[in-house]
Image (cartoon, grey):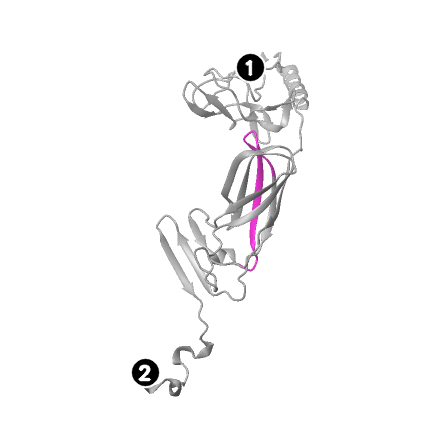
Amino acid sequence: MWRPPYITIGCPTSGGGKVISGNNRFLIDGIPVACVGDKATCPTHKVLATIVSGDPYMQIFGKAAARVNDSLSCGCKLLPQQNLVVQDNGGGAGSNSLLKNTQQSTQENFVEKKDFEIELVDLKVTPFIPLGVSTPEGKPSNKEHSFFIKIKKGICNAISLEVEQDGTFVEVKKIQKAFSPSQQVSLTWDGFINDFYNSKFMTKPSGVKFKVKGYSSGSVQCTHEKIFKFKYFNKDWMDVVINRKTKHILIDLRVNFSDGGAAGLFNSQSVPTTQI
């Protein structure tokens, strides 16, 4: 029994489209192999389709490698464009041994590449002011936080910024464009996580952990994490919570009552009698 060849980026589909993403760490003839979850264009159905079936015996980072005649989410099939074929001649235990050896040989034809690297270099640090609040001098607050990211290796076609909240990273910004090696990128974020802003989250003593990701051919190729701390200039004088969906804003003023407290100060003698 002949096993069909594996699919790589550029292979055609029965709907007139092409496979446009794959795993850059595993190559056939220098071309990334496509797996379940990768994408292909489909002019027939006018959609960006997803590969939904693959070879259960050929796993690439936990995803089945796509084969000729495997299916797309639009209903179309994948077609061949290269000559890698795996053969199983049948025959009981002997065939099982042959299949195992053949699969091992096939895996050796895949080349793992680690030629992508990204770094979250720095954050433009200024005294922290809650979103929408003016400074004590009356100047506008920072509308966005600026992060500086460096592409150290590889050509990325997208980068993203994630922030850790309750132990889980949440994507807050993504830029889709080509980034070349040694390029430094400025990425801005308005402080909202899923339409919710909380200045207390930003100023917690432990800091906030961020992660940047570099993408190529639709897959994450490199990541880097870093913790930044946001601090008020002198005192934590105001907390702001904003719900962008409900358009609710909650502002807490932190008032110091050391100048009199609830009882006030005994200074009535300083008030002019004309004002009483």
Amino acid on which the number 2 mark rests in the picture: Gln
Q: Secondary structure at mark 1?
A: loop
Q: Residue at x 57, y 26 (%)?
A: 22
Residue 275 badge: 2
Quarter occupied by residue 25: top right
Q: In the rendered view, would you say 225 is above or below 12? A: below
Q: Residue at x 49, y 54 (%)?
A: 142
**Quadrant of the snapshot with the N terminus:** top right
Distance in Å between CA atoms under marks 2 and 1: 92 Å
User: Which residue occupies the foreground of this view, 136 or 253?
Assistant: 136
Mark carried by residue 181:
none
**Number of the front mark, 2 or 1:** 2
Asked whether residue 25 is in view, the answer is: yes
The range drawn in magenta is 204-222
Residue 80: image tag: 1
Vertical arrangement, residue 97 with respect to residue 155, above or below = above
Q: Which amino acid type corresponds to the residue marked 1 in the rendered image?
A: Pro
Query: Residue placed farthest to the front in the image?
Result: 274
Q: Position of residue 240 (x, y in %)?
A: 43, 58
